[in-house]
Amino acid sequence: MRLPVLRSEETGALDFSCIDKPAATEMLRWAIDHGVNYVDTAYNYHEDASEQWLGEALADGYRERVKVATKMPAWKVERVSDFDRFLNEQTERLGGAPDFYLLHSLTGESWRKVHGFGVLAWAERALAEGRFSAFGFSFHDEYPVFEEIVDAALGLWSFCQIQLNYMDTQHQAGLRGLEYAAERGLGVVVMEPVRGGQLAKEPPRVREIWDSASVRRSPSEWALQWVWDHPEVSLLLSGMSTLQQVQENVAAAERSGPGGLSAEERMLVTRAHDAFRAGMVVNCTGCRYCSPCPQGVNISRILEIYNDAHIYDDLRRQRLFYSWLDKAARADRCTGCGECEARCPQLLEVAEWLRRAHALLGAEEAEK
């Protein structure tokens, strides 16, 4: 999903549907030649262009050397027949059946929808027919939903894919989800180990911590090694946009393994976590006592996005996340009724912070 892309001839802006195929193919084949054996894509990556490119790039004997994973866009499913429609289209794009097949980006809402359409019975049939070899899901919701999904199909799920990094230990599935799935026999694939590149940054307060280490690592490698240090992790995914990033990640993988960090090094990562968190501007703990909002505003998520814009100095990315919120849940729907402030354990002036958040994140130039 982060392959190199070309610029539009009309606008000069990067066109994420136009993959730089020679550069991307060189990256992929170099990775496979140096030991990478699992490649992850999805129906919608690069505006639906990723799977087609991958099928072409794995020619010349490379397909036989890797396991290919792709994902059904669960949020697009509107009827039972969509299960076959998406898989058939993806199989054609890839030039053959995927090895690993996931329900993509499950939330409570999308899970209940596809479950109601009988996706588990469909998957059992598809597995029996050899249309893919292993069935799983990727996840983006709160922890209780994760448990619900795992428990719904024990014996059918082979694996799950969760977001995990040293900043998101309690976010979504988090470390609890890692352990819960592993204890029940699921392989666990970790995505966003460098938090979309945010943990590759070095604000001065974090750089000082890495500089104090006895072992020299880049900020990205510290993040990767923290994930690999956990024995429950089966596989780590990292989006790469240049050949140099591929080479650096492969070299880091060669140095990795469960228990690869010393106790002292784990403490350094904890200090880096605290140093990043020191950039917070709103003392929101995400307790959600403010919910539900009478107007439907997603208060805790908005304040999290607003904080992240300051912690990681990445306004463009956070504006994108804000634009993904339902318009009815955005901060400009706040009426200042005060109900949330009366319930807030941190005594925050929630309405004022929501006003500031919308002014920053909802600007007209926000990325769509």
Image (cartoon, rainbow, N blue to C red):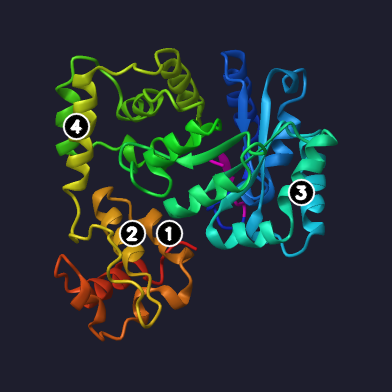
The label on residue 305 is 2
Q: Which residue carries the number 4 mark?
A: 207
Q: Residue at x 79, y 34 (%)?
A: 97
Distance, label 3 to label 4, CA atoms, is 51 Å
The residue tagged 3 is 121
Q: Tell which circle, 2 or 3, labels the residue nearer the N-terminal end.
A: 3
Q: Position of residue 278 (x, y in %)?
A: 16, 47
| Mark closest to the chain's N terminus, 1 or 4 | 4
Amino acid residing under circle 2: Ile
Quick check: can you spot residue 7? no
Q: Residue 258: tell me if it is visible.
A: yes
Q: Earlier in the sequence, mark 1 or mark 2?
A: 2
Badge 1 or badge 3: first in the primary sequence: 3
**Pointer 1 and pointer 2: residues touching (CB < 8 Å)?**
yes
Element under disc 3 = helix
Amino acid type for the residue under numbered disc 4: Arg
